[in-house]
Amino acid sequence: MKASPTTEKYSAIADDLLAAAPLNELGPGKPVAAIRARLADLSVQNIFGPHAVKDQTMAEACLSGLWLRFDYLDESHEISQSIHNATGSFWHGIMHRREPDYGNAKYWFHRVGQHPTFPAIHSAVRKFVASAAAAEISNEPAVAFLTNSSAWDPFKFVDLVELANRGRSKSVNWCQEVQRIEWEILFDFCFSAAAGKSP
């Protein structure tokens, strides 16, 4: 997700941070110590410059997402649990899935309901699966929903991540890529909403 030197996707600060973003583990991972001070210095104002913040809550959701992207689950959780809307619940659910606390993750995904990002996640995941080597997972029933479902199902994804983390699925790398897709689409939605743009 590296930004081109001449093209700004979000803001200079956000783009620079995301150029160093890891492909997250399915579990809690190891916080990226080299980025911690930069994350701690982030504020709703400086991360959006030069864009004006039109929606403070969605801007805070971006901060939660950035902490999570660099494996700071506690810091992300502290922010997401204070965001009382479907998007806050979405970040909260992802954090608990990675913790891992699968039951709690599902509780928060129930609170999400049908998030506006689900169609885009569903479409992007189907494209990813179609472009990848499907033979790797073709014999795994738990993975079938990635190609056969008519909509994004966060609960089935929680189940798949749990199987992968317990060594009962060969789809760890696939799940990491799907998790990345999910994060990028949700972050993009939050940033656009915070800046008052159509997501």
Image (cartoon, helix red, strand yellow):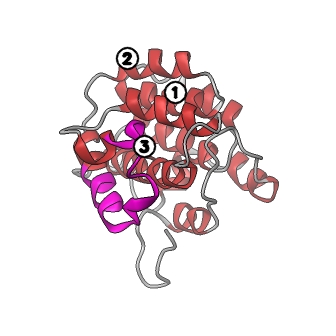
Helix, strand or loop for disc 3: loop
Helix, strand or loop for disc 2: helix
Dominant SS of magenta comes to helix
Query: Is residue 163 visible to us here?
Result: yes
Q: What residue type is labelled 3?
A: Glu
For the residues labelled 1 and 2, say whether their Cβ atoms are less than 8 Å apart: yes
Distance from label 1 to label 2 (Cα)? 10 Å
Q: Which label is found at residue 140?
A: 3
Nearer the camera: disc 1 or disc 3? 3
Dot 3 crowding, Cα within 10 Å, few <14, some 14–19, many 20+: few
Dividing the picture into quadrants, the one containing residue 71 is: top right
Dot 1 crowding, Cα within 10 Å, few <14, some 14–19, many 20+: many
Helix, strand or loop for disc 1: helix
- Give the image location of residue 84, x and y in percent: 42, 19
The residue that appears at 52% across and 66% down in the rendered structure is 15
- Give the image location of residue 44, x and y in percent: 53, 44
Counting residues from the N terminus, which is met first, the one under dot 1 or under dot 2? 1
Would you say 157 lies left or right of 19 here?
left
Q: Which amino acid does label 1 sit on?
A: His
Q: Which span is picked out in magenta?
A: 123-144
Q: Which label is found at residue 92?
A: 1
Vertical comparison of 83 with 27: above or below: above
Q: What residue type is labelled 2?
A: Arg
User: Label 2: which residue?
Assistant: 111
Distance from label 2 to label 3 (Cα)? 29 Å
- Give the image location of residue 153, x and y in percent: 32, 32
Query: Is residue 196 visible to us here?
Result: no
